[in-house]
Image (tube, rainbow, N blue to C red):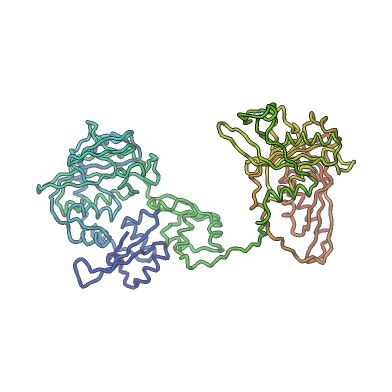
Amino acid sequence: MEYSLQTLNQRSRLKHLTLTNIIDTLNLIGFEVDDIFFENTFNNKDYQNIRLLLKVPANREDLANEHLLLKDLQSIFNFSVKNQWKLLKSYYSFILKQKYIKSKKNHSTKIQSTVPNVFIFISEIEYHLQDFSPFWIQKKLINSGYKPQNSIEDLLSLILLEWGELISFKNYEMSSLLNLSILSTNEIMEDESGNKKIIPKNTIVVKDSKNNIISFLGRFETTYSSLTKYTKVFEIIFYDIHENQLCLNPLESNISFRYLRNMFLIHLKSSLQRFLTLLELIYQGNISHNIVSTIQSIKKVSNYRFLKLNKQKLLNYLKSNTYNQNIFEKAGLKLVCSTSKQLYFQIPITRNDLKRDVDIIEEYCRFIGYSNFCEIPPIKTYKIKQTKIKPLEFIKTYFLNQGFQEINTNPIQDSKNKNSQSILLTNPLTNDYSLLRTELISQLFDNYSRNVRAGFETKNFFEIGRVFKKVSTNIHEIDKLGGIFQIENIKKDVDNSSEWFFAKGLLENFLLQFGYTKYQMKDLKLSHTSLFHPTRSIDILIHNNNIGSFGELNPKFKKSTFSKYATYLFEFDLSYFKAWRLQSQIKNYNIYSKYPIIIKDLSCSLSKQISFVELKKMIYNCSNNLKSVEFFDLYFSEKEKETININIRLKFQSFEKTLLTSDIEKCINSIQKNLNKKFCVIFDI
């Protein structure tokens, strides 16, 4: 929008400010000065006026209202706006009282409306037509970038400029039998000149008793006659497009929404008084006694609403230990209450840009001045970019180092393995090769069984391949990693049930290579033909996404292995194992402490559902002198099948002194207390 410095100076006397100071302040505060116009004034060619073209944020529609723009500038430049009417109002109170008494005789009728949250005010006026507008109105419009029309339209533009209220003139007979509705289909309307226009659906329209469209939202047309006296209907429409309770789409019709903007119902009385006063003084106008409105369909509008702001959140954003309360007042935010943790602000209803606590913080920063903030450079982190290592090569290397052997199986399977997600080949070579595989582990198990029966030493296999599934009418191709293996190097005195944890640890270490430290485990959903164990199989989930499955071989297939050791299966979706996840930070090496290490062992029992990663993280948080935490000797009790017993080895070391027994006991008590409170861990005495 455009605004004249001459007009601003007349309202506020900004003689102490230079043009450079004004422009720099506006740019710093978020109002971009896009252009500067130097021109002669309207009445004095020897006196130069300056107009600024301001680019205001899109969420500040209130600044298109001069009344609210002056309030914002008043906060920015710390001046007081002179209001001449407040001084003169007491002298003309007797005239105002007469007008108010006279207006009580007006008859108000409510429009029949099926459209909520839309307000329409319609009345008929009679005025003397003249082909000029007052000089002062033209001057003010020019200073604000409007082009005067030398007609009554200049008065309508003035009201729009001063109060943001859109007043339209219509040519139709006044009637109380009007209906407000939304078009469900396209309809045709004939204007005053006899031209027909198509009004698209979803347009808010006003219809008469004959169901003819006489007005629609946003229409703005004026026609004139050669008569000295002229009668017209003026109309005001209010709809809050920001809240948009009717869920209207502004893109559906450029006709109905062309002039639709967020007008402020709280200023309706002031803008209407201004309009009727100037109409009566300049054009000798009179308002009819019949007024039509839909006041029952608009909710009550409050002048203010309230927002709360957490003090600590403000300080975190500012990277500071204090804040200046005076800056809130300068920004026009009235602080109505302050507690130990919260600040409560009274926000004008016209500030649609202030709806969240972060918006208040942004407004605070705007009035500090962005140039006054200390620079906060980003923290440098050194990372190893393993750009040369592809994820498939890394996965193959990992499992080869763990004693696995890679195999490749045929992606086409026998028709006896058909299920609901299978994809049949339309022209198979034989029935044995007639459908595409939906998983990897069944063929891995067949190869594993043959190797065991043949007496080969190699018993651990993995495969990277693609599976094919039909979901509804779509075909999904997924790259998978599958494997089958045994763990034979388990001590004879260790319970066989702990072997499952050693096998799971192998895969947890694999997940750790890709940065997966936090994940969920759920019981695997099994079918009657599943190779997985019914009670010792899990799905592994990351953010509720299933990335793979792991479990022990079903006991009914154990005869095929001829082995006294348990067999384990796993299958992962490779779309969750990308190359970027292999990037890791460079380890920082610290100076080795010269003081001795003290080792303490704790024995405890806990639920199977507790993650060891979370458990270790909690232990480290309990003491700054912990050098390492190790879990060893996992064993189960036949009576308590839902719990496991483990030993925890704690290594303490300080860089400042030799730790005393009292220091160690204090740390251990803290560990036991916190683990018992959070994870219900029971420690043996």
Q: How many marks?
A: 0
Q: Residue at x 48, y 53 (%)?
A: 344
Of residue 158 and residue 205, the one placed in the foreground of this image is 205
Q: Residue at x 20, y 61 (%)?
A: 136
Q: From the viewer's perspective, is 664 left or right of 127?
A: right
- Note whether 10 is above or below 355 in the view shown: below
Of residue 477 and residue 143, the one placed in the foreground of this image is 477
Of residue 134 and residue 477, the one placed in the foreground of this image is 477
Q: Quadrant of residue 233?
A: top left
Q: Can residue 384 be seen? A: yes
Q: Residue 467, how many percent across, how many down?
A: 65, 37
Q: Residue at x 79, y 30 (%)?
A: 557
Q: Can residue 614 be seen? A: no
- Note whether 108 is above or below 433 in the view shown: below
- Note whether 317 is above or below 17 in the view shown: above
Q: From the viewer's perspective, is 117 left or right of 504?
A: left
Q: Residue 308, how many percent across, how many down?
A: 49, 52
Q: Residue 466, how many percent across, how many down?
A: 66, 40
Q: Residue at x 36, y 68 (%)?
A: 22
Which residue is at the far front? 429
Q: Residue 614, how many percent across, how many down?
A: 71, 48
Q: Quadrant of residue 141?
A: bottom left
Where the N terminus falls, by quadrant?
bottom left
